[in-house]
Amino acid sequence: MSFGSFMYLFKEGFKNVWVNRLMSFASIGTLMACMLLIGGSLLLSLNVNTIIGSVEQQNEAVVYPNDEITDEEIRELDTQISLIENVTDVIFIDKDQLLAETMAKGDELAKAMEGLPLGEDNPLQNTFRLRLKDQALAVETKSELESLDHVAEVYIQLDLAETITSIKRAVSLSGFTIVAILVVVSLVIIANTIKVTVFNRRKEINIMKSVGATSAFIRMPFLIEGFFIGLMSALMAFGLLWLGYNYIMLAISTSRTGWIKTAYENMLTFRQIALQMFIYFSAGGIGIGVFGSMFFMNKYLKV
Amino acid sequence: MSFGSFMYLFKEGFKNVWVNRLMSFASIGTLMACMLLIGGSLLLSLNVNTIIGSVEQQNEAVVYPNDEITDEEIRELDTQISLIENVTDVIFIDKDQLLAETMAKGDELAKAMEGLPLGEDNPLQNTFRLRLKDQALAVETKSELESLDHVAEVYIQLDLAETITSIKRAVSLSGFTIVAILVVVSLVIIANTIKVTVFNRRKEINIMKSVGATSAFIRMPFLIEGFFIGLMSALMAFGLLWLGYNYIMLAISTSRTGWIKTAYENMLTFRQIALQMFIYFSAGGIGIGVFGSMFFMNKYLKV
Amino acid sequence: MIEFINVSKTYRTGTHALHNFSLNIDRGEFVFVVGPSGAGKSTFIKLMMREEKPTEGEIYVNGQNLVKMRRRKVPYFRRTLGVVFQDFRLIPYMNVYDNVAFAMRVTNVRRREIRERVPYILKLVGLEGKSKSLPEHLSGGEQQRVALARALVNNPPLIIADEPTGNIDPELSFEIVDLLSEINKCGTTIVMVTHEHNLVSEFNHRVIMIEEGSVVSDNRNGRYSAE
Amino acid sequence: MIEFINVSKTYRTGTHALHNFSLNIDRGEFVFVVGPSGAGKSTFIKLMMREEKPTEGEIYVNGQNLVKMRRRKVPYFRRTLGVVFQDFRLIPYMNVYDNVAFAMRVTNVRRREIRERVPYILKLVGLEGKSKSLPEHLSGGEQQRVALARALVNNPPLIIADEPTGNIDPELSFEIVDLLSEINKCGTTIVMVTHEHNLVSEFNHRVIMIEEGSVVSDNRNGRYSAE
Ligand SMILES: Nc1ncnc2c1ncn2[C@@H]1O[C@H](COP(=O)(O)OP(=O)(O)OP(=O)(O)O)[C@@H](O)[C@H]1O
Ligand SMILES: Nc1ncnc2c1ncn2[C@@H]1O[C@H](COP(=O)(O)OP(=O)(O)OP(=O)(O)O)[C@@H](O)[C@H]1O
Ligand SMILES: [Mg+2]
Ligand SMILES: [Mg+2]
């Protein structure tokens, strides 16, 4: 194919977007709608995952040192605990502090604490509080902590760790499943759309064949057309998603409810994923536009 | 229109589904895909709502009676508390029971409880535990409880109640939003599909007009065709959703993780919603099939 | 029966297809319309069946004012015409029988009547063996005869044919015009556009010649009278 | 140049369009093909351009065996032909100029050449004023002439025309056949299906008559010799 005819076919494909505008608009609308769904659910599941990730660290573990431990040894133990891979946010709380804290909560047990003595006679225990980075490793971390010197007892809510781990797994699994279902459904819908639009032009394809056009020559404008339609759909879906996402973020950021605020702090900003999403959208849109029309044209090219 | 020509047009519409099978299949595929998405997300959000509903009741409230309360008065108070609209699952726990319970937990505070005496000298308090049906009414319920005789103090985690209420609202709001978005997106996609398929047949519509067919006569077969396509899409979407849902339920029911088990018990069975869903699907499919084609045909009927 | 008064037609593309076109055709006449390619013959026919509206002037067909006719009335008006289109206009997914029967079905005719009439008409145009064929499986001339059959099937008082023999061999063409002449003798008005000298001169009917959108000659003795 | 050896063609519908059809056309001949509607003339043409494959027999065109030709080679073979189709086959969304230019563009001709050649050919068929029109805005005869222009534009060694004057008035038809005869004199082979007696007898070319799928007469003196 010469450069001249390439340029001609390129222009032709570009023109066809407008000439067949009813069908181009329909294709762009459909492609865009599908991208919006996929992009939207991807954003949702990414955010839910990060929020769940932040919830994960709410499960506190407690380490009780021996009663005879010296202040020196406490500092040493603190360092050792902090050095464990899966451990973060280690805090030492001495027993007086713990008593004051518990009383301040004012719940059922607070009454029981009333009148307990401070200092040496305080029946409560010195405590290390810490968080686990990954709840799935709770059991391993527990035994690692237990193997440290001067550690009397390690208390980790293993059942809670398991629950959190399985919720996390379930959420990311269902997020993945939903996105996968949307991708499959979108492909079905888009394939149908392309099939119908190509079917619409089977007569013209036939005419071109009968005056000596090669398959490649006929395909080219369709290819260019598919490229533009895919690109335009991607651009529009990207733009709409951006607007919509920022609108929702704005709505959330003004909320006064505590957990929503926390969630908001953990949410991704659109900028963080914009480039990647744009690349996926464009590649997906163009890929589908180009290969979809190639695929469904073959039937009519065999004349 | 005579009965004879009605029958003819009915058969014609039925035949056209097959004659234009490429486009019929495309329309059915698209319609079905959209229904699957909507139905699936509806099922998901209904289930998440019921599960959240069951979580809601995990927030316990505690009522401390006066120290001087008699056994007789405790029973009386129990009845009075139970009579409050928003209250459920009232349990009386005497202070010895509470002590045993707390010790059994084995956490930070358990150590502190070691050696506390039972009976008269037990420093803990008698307690009523209860649950709220609706966390949103926590404040009102609290003051209602406080106004009862022999009540010394009422302890409800108002901030937790607020959090649960707002999560519940956020979940049902986002469920509704997602379904609404899917409906809008589906309408866009389906409208485009119908537009393209009607566009495909503009020439035939034109020919019919030019041999003296009225608009009603031309519309009839399209209407019947739209009816069948809508109905078939609804049936297939319904069937697939049924299979898929039961498959997922089966997968979940075999899980050994605790919270998944609890969630499973709270999930809807497909039968509970099957009839309603089937009616919505059929009505939606047929409505869209029929009115969609009517709407987009008008342009080509004005010849 | 047909009256064109100072009709002009300019298409949206700016082409002036007819200028100041006036014509009168009485009930029961047989008129050949001749003229060079692009003269406006098909435009004349499209105006007559109200497929197009004139830019100026008035048109009366079967006593009805086509310019003022309501859109709802158009289908009922068209049923009083039998039209053979230059491009055939067959419905591609209907077979020959159904294409012809369609013109009867739109008029609420009883089914038994359709079952009797359609095969009879198909036989008349020599397509008795092709009633189950789809248009795309027919030869050019066969398609044209289906279009003719559809125009005849309702026995309309006015038959308008736009080159109904362009794809048909001379012998069959002669037979078809002969058939139309027979129908004409029973009182049906016939307007037929044709390019075939031989046909026009063989049948002694009125000949209207159109050139560049106007009637340039109108002859009752079946002769061309080009300038 | 063209050789049909015992060719039979039965369509998938079961219609026997050609039986035992044998024919030889030499380079530089001008052949009229005549015969009644449905005789198999268009089928003969479709076989010649390899739009259809024969059920039996062998076909050679331009020295190539069409039965054995690979599918990839077909486009290159078709570029050596200029075909006027009975149903025109114009691309509906391209204007007249682009429809004609398309046949040149597929062959990688330089753009300057296209810009010179297309207007020249359009002028030849009398469509110089319509180059920007879409096919649907043309009269029947104008569309047919676009199809003719497209067949001529590449100056092919073989021109095949299926009733190229069916929608065109006698004067212009005569001019067109005259044009084809001129082209033929420069060595181009021409096969033209027609129904018009006058044309066939006015030009003294070879006449092949097809009836019911077989050659029933083959006359070099420009006469019909029906049974
Ligand atoms: N739909 C249309 N839009 C624009 N211009 C048109 C349209 N139809 C026809 N024309 C133009 O109007 C003029 C008259 O066309 P018309 O079809 O009436 O010619 P005709 O006499 O039927 O010719 P032919 O014998 O070739 O069929 C031509 O120049 C044609 O190009
Ligand atoms: N694609 C097809 N499928 C099935 N049958 C066909 C097809 N094309 C043509 N026929 C049949 O084959 C026979 C020959 O058709 P063909 O088109 O060759 O006739 P023709 O000589 O060109 O006639 P005309 O002068 O009417 O154009 C006819 O009976 C026709 O119905
Ligand atoms: Mg015309
Ligand atoms: Mg033919």
Image (cartoon, coloured by chain):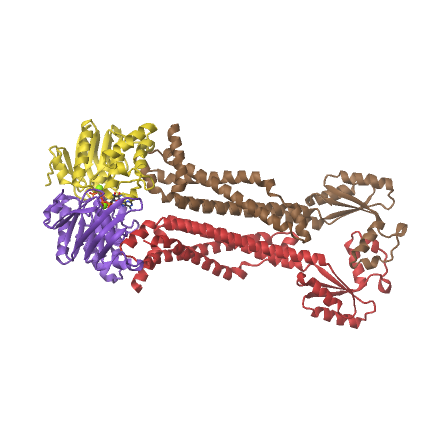
Chain colours: A red, B brown, C yellow, D purple
Residue A1 image point, x, y percent = 31, 63
Number of numbered discs: 0
| The quarter of the displayed image where residue C28 is located | top left
- In the rendered view, tell whether residue D91 sits above or below residue C21: below
Residue closest to the eye, C201 or D142: C201
Closer to us: B160 or B244? B244
* Residue at (86, 39) in percent of width and height: B72
Residue C80, image x, y percentages: 27, 30
Q: Residue A165 vs residue D29: left or right?
A: right
Residue A216 in view: yes
Query: B267 or C7, which is in the foreground?
Result: B267
Q: Is residue B170 left or right of residue C93?
A: right
Residue located 76% across and 41% down the image: B144
Q: Position of residue D154 (x, y in %)?
A: 21, 58
Residue B187 appears anywhere in the view: no
The picture quadrant for ligand 2 comes to top left
| Image x and y of residue B210, in percent | 30, 36
Image side of residue C204 versus residue A97, left or right: left
The answer to whether B191 is drawn above or below residue D29 in the figure is: above
Q: Quadrant of residue D60?
A: bottom left
Residue at 52% x, 47% y is B37
Q: Which of C157 and B116 lies nearest the eye of the viewer?
A: C157
Residue C118 sits above or below residue B189 on the image? above
